[in-house]
Image (cartoon, grey):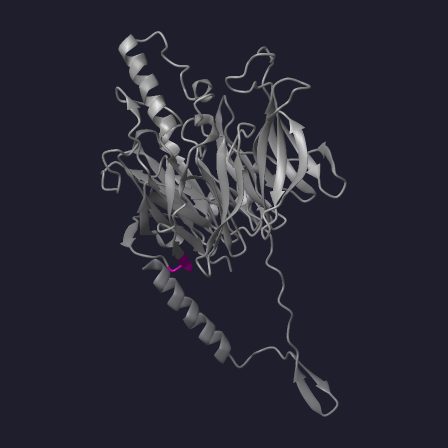
């Protein structure tokens, strides 16, 4: 109501100004012709704001079932048959060396027998392909499919799904005991799907990581670089690639010859594609996983305050457009746009709240964020995507599924306090916007394959909670 009154007041004021006869003369005479001078629009001034500049407003959210007005598109991938295969680690002569036999060996003999019999069943049964990672590049969606449910490492393929035509083709296949992953850390680097493969480092002990790219047409692979240690995350950089890695980690189940006393050290290195060499990485904390961060129009924001490990202090957020000093001293997530700032906070037993600093209307909107405390939240051009785990058991999971909950997909428009629930799934893969070259927001929803391989109620083999197949692909307009 207040916004409506303010709007009509502004219209009335504008009409009065336009009808005023004492308008300044902004025309110039050019010979006998008088031409109007168009005053150049000035760039908006940089704003420095505090809590005192915003009127506090408590609001309640409204849930709408259906698609949001945000340029939402979708494609159905549920009908694609990725086939099934027997991983080479299941071969009779080597199968006893693989699979998870490392736990509870001193348990009840009957349980150990049941576990080993279950592993044997896994080794004798072809594995239906399940998705490990994905990336969208242009109009093609790349999916890394895993066919190894014994140990998860030795049989995989990269598929290219053309969104316009619906055609899906196998681009490259990795089958063999020398492989130690499934197109891990898959990203878009220069328009090509790029990933990390892990190999034994015989010279230094432990393991090394090799970065490779795949030609999107032929499927041929090109080795870009290799580095010691385990690369657990990477992203494109201005010069080439940033690699987040740790060193000192021995290869699992292959400890002979490795120095188990090595201290694990996390480092960031940058590979310069033009020079073909590694250099010291200059990394803003906004690019580091797990660090409270935000970006505004692609530029990392500066965040000060919050909990520093010892005390709490008010949070200040600085972007290229504004600085806002708040009274909030704790945040679980921060999101920035040119015209607003959102801070999600937990206030003791009262739950989660979202504070939206609406710069245009100079209002601080406080909204209860019920059920979203542990949700995965992703920013889009004008709103937020939230993936909320529900315990209402209303999902599609069956008696063999590894989880008995449903994940609900919401699109939230903070300044309107509107939440659109547009889908649900057993699990999902989403864009990591810091690794997406086109910064598009997309989600692949997944259906659980379930798992009948249990030993006295405990799953064995490759982690069954990660065994899912594609369902629907959603993406949003980015303009």
Q: Is residue 314 above or below residue 360?
A: above
Residue at x 75% of width, y 44% of height: 274
Q: Tell me the quarter of the picture where residue 96 sits.
A: top left
**In front: 307, or 441?**
441
Q: Is residue 294 above or below residue 149?
A: below
Total numbered badges shown on the rendered structure: 0
Report x, y in % for residue 381: 48, 54
Instruction: Let me know if residue 72 is in the magenta part.
Output: yes
Instruction: Let me know if residue 334 is in the magenta part.
Output: no
**In front: 347, or 257?**
257
**In front: 87, or 64?**
87
- Horizontal side of 217 relative to 9 (left or right) equals right
Magenta: main secondary structure equals loop
Q: Tell me the quarter of the picture where residue 35 sits.
A: bottom right
Residue at x 27% of width, y 54% of height: 65
Residue 470 visible to an observer of this rendering: yes
Furthest toward the bottom, the residue is 32
Residue 108 visible to an observer of this rendering: no
Quadrant where the N terminus sits is bottom left
Report x, y in % for residue 241: 65, 39
Furthest toward the right, the residue is 275
**In front: 162, or 31?**
162
Report x, y in % for residue 7: 39, 65
Furthest toward the front, the residue is 93
Residue at x 57% of width, y 19% of height: 249
Which portion, as a residue range, is magenta?
69-73
């Amino acid at each position: 109501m207040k916004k409506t009154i303010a709007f009509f007041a502004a219209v009335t004021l504008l009409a009065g100004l336009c009808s005023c006869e004492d308008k300044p003369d902004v025309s110039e005479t050019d010979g006998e012709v008088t031409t109007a001078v168009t005053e150049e629009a000035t760039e908006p001034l940089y704003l420095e704001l505090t809590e005192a500049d915003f009127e506090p407003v408590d609001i309640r959210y409204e849930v709408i079932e259906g698609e949001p007005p945000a340029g939402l598109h979708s494609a159905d991938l549920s009908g694609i048959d990725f086939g099934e295969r027997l991983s080479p680690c299941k071969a009779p002569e080597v199968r006893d060396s693989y699979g998870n036999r490392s736990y509870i060996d001193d348990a009840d003999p009957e349980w150990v027998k049941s576990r080993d019999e279950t592993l044997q069943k896994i080794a004798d049964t072809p594995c239906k392909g399940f998705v490990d990672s994905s990336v969208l590049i242009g109009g093609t969606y790349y999916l890394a499919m895993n066919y190894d449910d014994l140990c998860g490492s030795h049989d995989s393929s990269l598929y290219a799904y053309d969104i316009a035509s619906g055609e899906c083709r196998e681009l490259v296949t990795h089958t063999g005991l020398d492989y130690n992953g499934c197109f891990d850390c898959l990203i878009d680097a220069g328009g090509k799907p790029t990933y990390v493969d892990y190999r034994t480092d015989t010279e230094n002990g432990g393991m090394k990581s090799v970065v490779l790219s795949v030609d999107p047409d032929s499927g041929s692979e090109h080795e870009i670089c290799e580095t010691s240690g385990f690369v657990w995350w990477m992203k494109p950089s201005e010069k080439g690639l940033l690699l987040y890695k740790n060193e000192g980690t021995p290869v699992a189940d292959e400890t002979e010859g490795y120095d188990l006393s090595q201290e694990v050290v996390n480092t960031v290195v940058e590979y310069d594609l033009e020079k073909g060499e590694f250099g010291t990485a200059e990394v803003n904390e906004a690019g580091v996983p797990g660090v409270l961060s935000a970006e505004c129009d692609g530029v990392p924001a500066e965040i000060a305050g919050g909990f520093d490990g010892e005390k709490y202090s008010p949070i200040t957020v600085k972007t290229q457009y504004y600085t806002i000093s708040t009274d909030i001293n704790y945040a679980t997530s921060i999101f920035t746009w040119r015209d607003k700032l959102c801070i999600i906070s937990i206030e003791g037993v009262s739950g989660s709240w979202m504070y939206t600093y609406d710069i245009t209307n100079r209002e601080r909107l406080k909204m209860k964020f019920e059920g979203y405390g542990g949700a995965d939240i992703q920013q889009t051009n004008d709103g937020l995507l939230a993936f909320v785990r529900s315990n209402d058991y209303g999902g599609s999971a069956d008696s063999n599924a590894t989880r008995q909950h449903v994940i609900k997909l919401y699109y939230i428009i903070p300044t309107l306090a509107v939440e659109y629930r547009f889908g649900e799934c057993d699990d999902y893969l989403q864009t990591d916007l810091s690794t997406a070259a086109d910064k598009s927001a997309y989600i692949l929803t997944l259906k659980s394959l379930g798992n009948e391989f249990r030993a006295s109620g405990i799953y064995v083999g490759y982690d069954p909670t990660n065994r899912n197949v594609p369902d629907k692909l959603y993406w949003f307009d980015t303009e």
